[in-house]
Amino acid sequence: MNADSSSFSHPDYDVAVIGGGPGGAALATFLARNGHHCIIFEKSKFPRYHIGESLIPHTHGIFERLGLLPQLRASAFPVKHSVRFVSHNGKESVPFYFSETIPGERSRTWQVERSQFDRLMLDHARARGVEVHEQTSISEVRFEGERAVGVEIVSNNGARSFVPAKVVVDASGRACVIGRQLGLLSPLPELRKASAWGYFQGGKRLPGIDAGETTMFLIPGGGWFWYIPLPDDIVSVGIVADPEYVFSQSDEMEAAFTREVALCAPLADRLSAARRVGPVRGLRHLAYLNRQTCGDGWVMIGDARAFLDPIYSSGLYLALGSAELAAECIDEGLKCGDVSASRIGRFEPALWKGVDVVRRLIHAFYDPAFSFPKFAERFPEHRAALIDCLVGDVIKDMSKFTAALAQMTLPPPPLGSNLPKLFTPALASGVAQL
Ligand SMILES: Cc1cc2nc3c(=O)[nH]c(=O)nc-3n(C[C@H](O)[C@H](O)[C@H](O)COP(=O)(O)OP(=O)(O)OC[C@H]3O[C@@H](n4cnc5c(N)ncnc54)[C@H](O)[C@@H]3O)c2cc1C
């Protein structure tokens, strides 16, 4: 449905969501289930392309609570049981099977083609009573004083109107609508990585339950490739490395990507009989966060809050997890008529704490002195916690694990310490507890 001012079914929405990606769709589904009137504005027409295809198992409970497991089980998405690291000289780690720490079906997840997965989630939200307007962009959030009171929309025929809502949720992904509007967006200088990626048909698949694994091919200088099997014999392959490496001045991105694939012998071997399909895409700056992530009448979820690095495939989990946590707090706030920042942003400290565990592990990964096999060998008692991180089970006390990590790799500076402005109080208290 496209939006013009006459096409809204309610005069007064409880929640207006900017963006119908997985985060926005999940949040609205949870809130609609509790009887709240939710409206999603999505600027694209689904299905649309999106990067970020590898799920982690801790999403299982969220899919269960959303009622999406039957559709996922019936899908053609390859089942992912594990992650494996391959060094540039071809030495392979033992696969980290999620079943080492998680019993049953919860130990597996899926590699998803995002156009199909995101459409599935948005259709599901619609089916659960969420009003969805595609091809409708939010130009800005309207504030009265510090409080968000609704959104300014632009439909694809150029019509503009204002939609009031008690709560505005920014789920706009890297567009970071509120972050840009309020000047809150900050690059993370400590994690300077770029990425380029493409799709291949006919790449080799491993036998048995390893067929759907994510394989990480490490390259000299701290970069790496992902290799993610998708439906229809397609594999997603991407490089993450320093921007100068991915986008060298003398090279076009496509030429650099093709050269780097050829230089990574174990990856080139997997792709020896494959042909690239579609364009090479890229991003020069991956990591950022917002210095404030909630306020009176508004919250940010998913990539609209922050994005660190794709190494642990945590993006979708954090989008879905933040959506569920935010939905719980918004539900409580709406029920008691208090949508102040302290009420609807109550989830923030716990979430930032989990994000910080992931951040520490990201720094460890890029430290040449650190390696997962060496860590698992030196601290066998923490191998389970390492797998907890790989599955996304990080929103809990991980202090013993991070203390062990600190014995092998220096912890990064405290989150946000090198950013120019102070965090929101909720975030500051979350960081203080780390
Ligand atoms: C190189 C790379 C590799 C990645 N690999 C993985 C991976 O393997 N696994 C993983 O879990 N994650 C991965 N990610 C991260 C993952 O893509 C994101 O974390 C995830 O898509 C976030 O979901 P979201 O719902 O927050 O945002 P999105 O999925 O980006 O959805 C946001 C939606 O908002 C819409 N929108 C934007 N602006 C507006 C506006 N003004 N008005 C209305 N609508 C708007 C957009 O059209 C979009 O549909 C990767 C990211 C990168 C950059």
Image: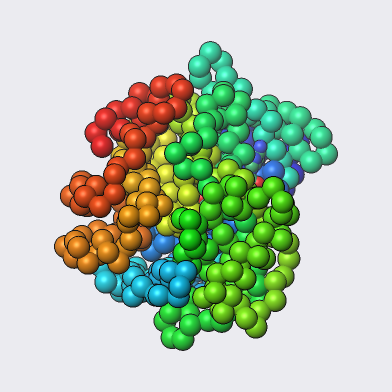
Query: In the current view of this chain or complex, which residue is farthest to the bottom?
Result: 207
- The quadrant of the image that shows the C terminus is top left
Q: Could you tell me residue 147's position as x and y percent? A: 51, 19
- The residue under the point 65% across, 72% down is 200
What residue is at 46 percent from the left and 23 percent from the top? 420
Q: Is residue 395 left or right of residue 128?
A: left
Q: Position of residue 87 (x, y in %)?
A: 43, 69
The residue located at (72%, 51%) in the rendering is 250
Residue 371 placement, left or right of 211:
left
Q: How is the image coloured?
A: rainbow
Residue 155's x, y, as percent?
Answer: 76, 38
The residue depicted at 41 percent of the width and 61 percent of the height is 56
Q: Nearer the viewer, residue 130 or 249?
A: 249
Asked whether 322 or 364 is in front, the reply is 364
Q: Looking at this view, is 179 or 138 the one in front?
A: 179
Asked if residue 164 shows in the view, the reply is no
- Residue 178 visible in the current orientation: yes
Of all residues, the one furthest to the right in this rendering is 157
Question: Extreme top residue here?
Answer: 145
